[in-house]
Image (cartoon, rainbow, N blue to C red):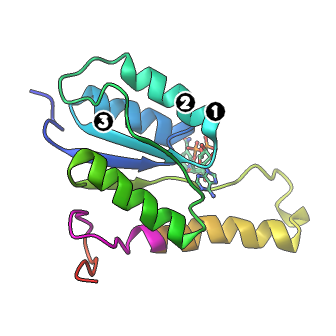
Amino acid sequence: MNILSGKRALVIGAGSGIGAATAKLFAAEGAAVAVADIDEAGLAATVAAIGNIGNAGNTRKPPSFRMDITDAAQVHATMDAAAKALGGLDIVLNTPFIDGHPDLLGLTEKQFRREFDVLGSGTLYTFQPRTASVCVPCSRVSR
Ligand SMILES: NC(=O)c1ccc[n+]([C@@H]2O[C@H](COP(=O)([O-])OP(=O)(O)OC[C@H]3O[C@@H](n4cnc5c(N)ncnc54)[C@H](O)[C@@H]3O)[C@@H](O)[C@H]2O)c1
């Protein structure tokens, strides 16, 4: 039996790297998966790859959402839409971070603030689901 059979997962940052690999692994392990990222081309590649996995628990064409994790309204709208599409969420995985700056000390203030916004604000927003059908520890889902 696949270890994620019956589970419903939203993977944010699924357009590349850890998020893309994890979204595919979740689908291969039987989860129904929704994917989100700021990068539409990356998202499309992950959706296509998951569609080819053909697992019983897999949504053949995963719900896919272009979103910016630094925008609370977009994060909450994505979580609501993913939960609606999959009938709830058991897992929300948040992977985005930007670290493509080899010269750390050469970061501009704008780049520095953007990095922390992606990491800090994005993490906070994903822990503030607005619907009771999203199961996240510590969430105050009664709002
Ligand atoms: N890959 C590894 O082996 C590894 C190991 C340890 C730590 N990390 C760290 O984990 C983080 C993620 O690694 P990765 O390899 O998956 O990186 P990645 O760059 O391949 O993927 C990050 C994804 O996040 C998305 N993203 C960026 N900003 C976003 C935003 N504002 N809203 C929504 N999506 C956004 C990108 O479009 C991209 O698809 C990095 O900080 C990396 O340093 C990676």
Please say whether residue 126 is one of the residues in the magenta stretch.
yes
Please say whether residue 15 is one of the residues in the magenta stretch.
no
Residue on which the image places disc 1: 41
Q: What residue type is labelled 1?
A: Ala
Q: Position of residue 111 (x, y in %)?
A: 81, 65
Q: Are marks 2 and 1 in contact (CB under 8 Å)?
A: yes
Depth check: give the residue in front, 124 or 103: 124
Residue found 27% across the figure and 67% down from its top:
136
Q: Where is residue 3 in the image (x, y as percent from the top left)?
A: 15, 35
The quadrant in which residue 57 appears is top left
User: How many marks overall?
Assistant: 3
Q: Is residue 36 above or below residue 43?
A: below
Q: In this view, does 132 lie above or below 67?
A: below
Quarter of the image with the N terminus in it = top left
Q: How far apart are marks 2 and 3 (CA)?
A: 17 Å
Residue found 39% across the figure and 39% down from its top:
63
Residue on which the image places disc 3: 26
Front position among marks 2 and 3: 2
Residue found 43% across the figure and 43% down from its top:
35
Q: Which of marks 2 and 3 is nearer the N terminus?
A: 3
**Ligand 1 has an atom within 8 Å of the beta carbon of the residue at disc 3:** no
Front position among marks 3 and 1: 1
Q: How far apart are marks 2 and 1 (CA)?
A: 5 Å
Residue on which the image places disc 2: 44
Question: Of helix, strand and loop, which mostly describes the magenta segment?
Answer: loop
Q: Is residue 50 above or below residue 34?
A: above
Q: Earlier in the sequence, mark 3 or mark 1?
A: 3
Q: Residues within 10 Å of mark 3 (few under 14, many from 20)?
A: many
Quarter of the image with the C terminus in it = bottom left
Q: What stretch is highlighted in magenta?
A: 125-136
Q: Which amino acid does label 3 sit on?
A: Phe
Q: Position of residue 32 (x, y in %)?
A: 25, 37
